[in-house]
Image (spheres, grey):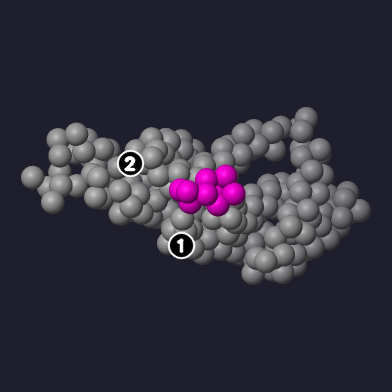
Amino acid sequence: MFFSSTRIPKFIGSVLFVCAGFLTYGDSLLFEKIYLALLGFVAVLFIRDINIVSIIVISAAANLSSEILYPLVISEHFQLILKLLTYLAVCYTLYKVSEDSMRLPTVIVVGLCLTTECYWYLTSQEAPMIFWYVLLLTINLWVRHFLFARVFIMAKYFPTQYRSLNLDHTLYQLVFFYILLHQLVLVEYILRRVFDVSSTHIYYAAPYIFHGLTTYSALLVLIQGYILISKNWFKA
């Protein structure tokens, strides 16, 4: 028997979660909840592997932070302070992630955003919430940073259990596309609002691309977990 009777429900549960990712295309709020549930499910599933769990913690922290911050971003009471904190945070982040290849293009995009924010302020125009995308850029830069540094952090606190995984590099490269897409959304939005360029292609395509990237990342985590513990889970 290839699967033991106690492993079949776990395998089916994994497949169902991934399928749910594809079936919720177009409903980002529902998908975010499913994705966080998936990360929790996988963390419990592979609780004995500290390396998989640490990667899940990084991913979950990023998603939870955006979930928590978004209601504050759209609140009139917190928008101004959050805008200021966001630009301060992204400046500090860009200082810290000097090893990241996305640092320079992000510096350029953030500089464009700050210039545009000043233009809107000086011309007494109502400023759209482009700082939300700057905030998401900041979060993803930190995700890349911690994925890059994860092995060194684990070696310090778990010297007998840490190991480098292919998943570290794969997710590190995947987050590149998150950051790139956020940058493109910002540039397109500024061109549309400031220079009257009639383009919304990236803006409307972005949620579906993000959804696909996130579903793919969840699938990668599942596959890596099963590979690592297959000797314990599958019978010869």
Which residues lie in the magenta part?
154-162
Write down the quadrant of residue 43 in the picture: top left
Residue 220 seen from this side: yes
The residue wearing badge 1 is: 170
The residue wearing badge 2 is: 17
**Residue 232 pos. (x, y %):** 25, 45
Q: What element carries label 1?
A: helix
Q: Furthest residue to the right?
A: 122
Does 150 sit above or below residue 39?
below
Q: How crowded is mark 1: few (under 14 residues within 10 Å), some or many (20 or more)?
A: some
Q: Label 1 is placed on what type of residue?
A: Thr
- Between tags 1 and 2, which lies in front? 1
Left or right: residue 57 compared with residue 190: left
Left or right: residue 107 compared with residue 38: right
Nearer to the camera, 113 or 141: 141
Left or right: residue 28 compared with residue 98: left
Going from N to C along the chain, the mark reached first, 1 or 2, is 2
Nearer to the camera, 16 or 191: 16
Q: Furthest residue to the top?
A: 77
Residue found 43% across the figure and 53% down from its top: 217
Q: Residues within 10 Å of mark 2 (few under 14, many from 20)?
A: many
Q: Label 2 is placed on what type of residue?
A: Phe
Left or right: residue 147 compared with residue 38: right
**Residue 101 pos. (x, y %):** 64, 69
Residue found 24% across the figure and 50% down from its top: 231
Residue found 30% across the figure and 42% down from its top: 14
**Residue 18 pos. (x, y %):** 33, 46
